[in-house]
Structures are given as structure tokens and as C-alpha cells.
């Protein structure tokens, strides 16, 4: 090993990964994924799909999960900066409903591994952001679920965001500190909170 530093997060199943970056006056080089290094760190997941998205400042995507085909995700940002969040949805987990967040940026080059059984979302903090992630299962149309990004029961502390909870996932009334309004898809505006989404017997 030696090309990555792996930090276990307070919630089991979440890891912040920092690759070794080799730089000089020409630029830099870094291995963004090495299966052998990951396995030596105890992470033996296998990836089947790579995705990339671009977003503008104030865009919030999430919180997303797949109901029957959960995906583990290794996420990173290659341009700009986002605040990335995972919420534990594993029934019986001692940290069920708890969240953990980390800033990912082109400068810090951190990666965030989110195991299966979590909801995931991110908020774009810079003018633009390009977001890349590897998945352990394929995207299955019709299997997607979601949670309200501002569910008070979860209580995510989104940085640089101002506004008051109005009882729904609507972004109306929320903005970044510089006045940039929160921007969300119609789908993400209508997710319910944790209690209304998961009703255990």
C-alpha cells in the first residue's frame, strides 16, 4: 500500500480516502483508483459503473438511494467543490438515521466511499462542479428512492446555507451565504422525511 490514506468515519461503512499526489512545476499525478491498494485497506468492493455529472452553484442533488439494488459509491470532485452527505438507512444499525458529510474538491482530492444502505446527496459550493463516482451496482430505473434533504429528524448541517424549514423539501426560502438560491430538481423537491419513507413494523 502507500498510494492512499483511508480514514474510517464515525458511521461504520463510510470512509474518506486521500490518494498520494505527486506534484512538481509541471503539474501533478495521482492514482485515483487502485484495486490492490483498496483491498489492502480492507475495502474489497467491485465496481460495475462509472458516472459523472456537472452542476452549477447552489445545486443540491439528493438524497438518493436504490430500494432493492443498493449501490456502494466511491465519489470525488474533479472541478470545483461540493459538500457531500451520506445518511444511514440500514435497518437495525446503531447509527440508523444519522448523517456524515465531507467537503470534496479539486484541491483536496479527497474521495468518499459510501457503502450500500445509505442515502446520498451533495450541495455545490462553487460556480461549477464536476462530480465523478464509481458504483457497485447498476442504475435500475424505477428503483430509485429519496429523502427530504432538510428532514429535521436527520438534521443535516449544510454549510454556507441559510433558510428556515417550512415543513417540506421545497428549496424556496433557502440560499447560500452569497445569495445564490438553492436549485433542485422537481423530483428532489417532493421527497418525504425519514419517518414517512420508512415505516417499520
Image (cartoon, rainbow, N blue to C red):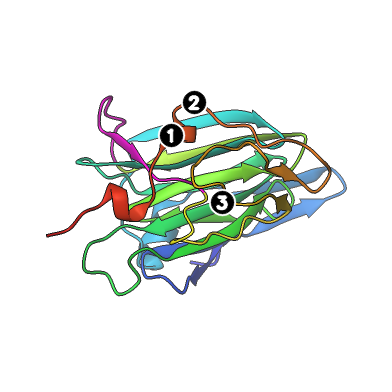
Looking at the image, the residue that sits furthest to the left is 201
Q: Earlier in the sequence, mark 3 or mark 1?
A: 3
Report the side of 54 relative to 200 (left or right).
right
Q: Position of residue 134 (x, y in %)?
A: 43, 41
Front in this rendered view, residue 120 or 194:
194
Q: Position of residue 88 (x, y in %)?
A: 36, 60
Mark 3 residue element = strand
Residue 190: give its label. 1
The dominant secondary structure in magenta is loop
Q: Is residue 77 magenta?
A: no
Judge whether residue 45 can be spotted in this image.
Answer: no
Q: Residue at x 62, y 44 (%)?
A: 123
Q: Position of residue 196 (x, y in %)?
A: 30, 49
User: Bounds of the magenta span?
Assistant: 137-149
Which residue in the protein does label 2 denote?
Answer: 186
Q: Residues within 10 Å of mark 3 (few under 14, many from 20)?
A: many
Q: Residue at x 77, y 53 (%)?
A: 23
Report the side of 41 relative to 111 (left or right).
left
Q: Residues within 10 Å of mark 2 (few under 14, many from 20)?
A: few
C-alpha gap between disc 3 and disc 1: 20 Å
Front in this rendered view, residue 12 or 22:
12
Q: Position of residue 51 (x, y in %)?
A: 46, 31
Which residue in the protein does label 3 denote?
Answer: 84
- Of tags 3 and 2, the one toward the viewer is 2
Tags 1 and 2 touching, CB below 8 Å: yes
Q: Residues within 10 Å of mark 1 (few under 14, many from 20)?
A: some
Q: Residue at x 31, y 55 (%)?
A: 195
Amino acid at each position: 500500500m502507500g498510494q492512499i490514506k483511508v480514514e474510517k468515519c464515525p458511521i461504520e461503512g463510510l470512509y474518506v480516502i486521500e490518494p498520494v499526489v505527486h506534484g512538481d512545476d509541471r503539474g501533478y499525478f495521482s492514482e485515483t483508483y487502485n484495486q490492490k491498494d483498496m483491498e489492502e485497506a480492507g475495502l474489497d468492493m467491485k465496481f460495475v459503473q462509472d458516472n459523472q455529472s456537472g452542476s452549477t452553484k447552489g445545486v443540491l442533488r439528493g438524497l438518493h438511494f436504490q430500494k432493492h439494488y443498493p449501490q456502494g459509491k466511491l465519489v470525488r470532485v474533479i472541478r470545483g467543490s461540493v459538500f457531500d452527505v451520506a445518511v444511514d438507512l440500514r435497518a437495525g444499525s446503531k447509527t440508523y438515521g444519522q448523517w456524515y458529510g465531507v467537503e470534496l474538491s479539486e484541491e483536496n482530492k479527497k474521495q468518499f466511499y459510501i457503502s450500500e444502505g445509505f442515502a446520498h446527496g451533495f450541495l455545490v459550493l462553487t460556480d461549477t462542479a464536476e462530480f465523478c463516482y464509481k458504483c457497485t451496482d447498476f442504475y435500475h430505473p424505477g428503483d430509485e428512492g429519496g429523502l427530504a434533504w432538510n428532514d429535521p429528524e436527520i438534521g443535516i448541517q449544510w454549510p454556507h446555507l441559510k433558510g428556515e424549514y417550512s415543513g417540506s423539501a421545497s428549496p424556496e426560502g433557502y440560499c447560500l451565504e452569497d445569495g445564490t438560491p438553492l436549485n433542485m430538481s422537481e423530483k428532489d423537491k417532493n421527497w418525504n422525511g425519514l419517518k414517512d419513507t420508512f415505516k417499520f413494523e
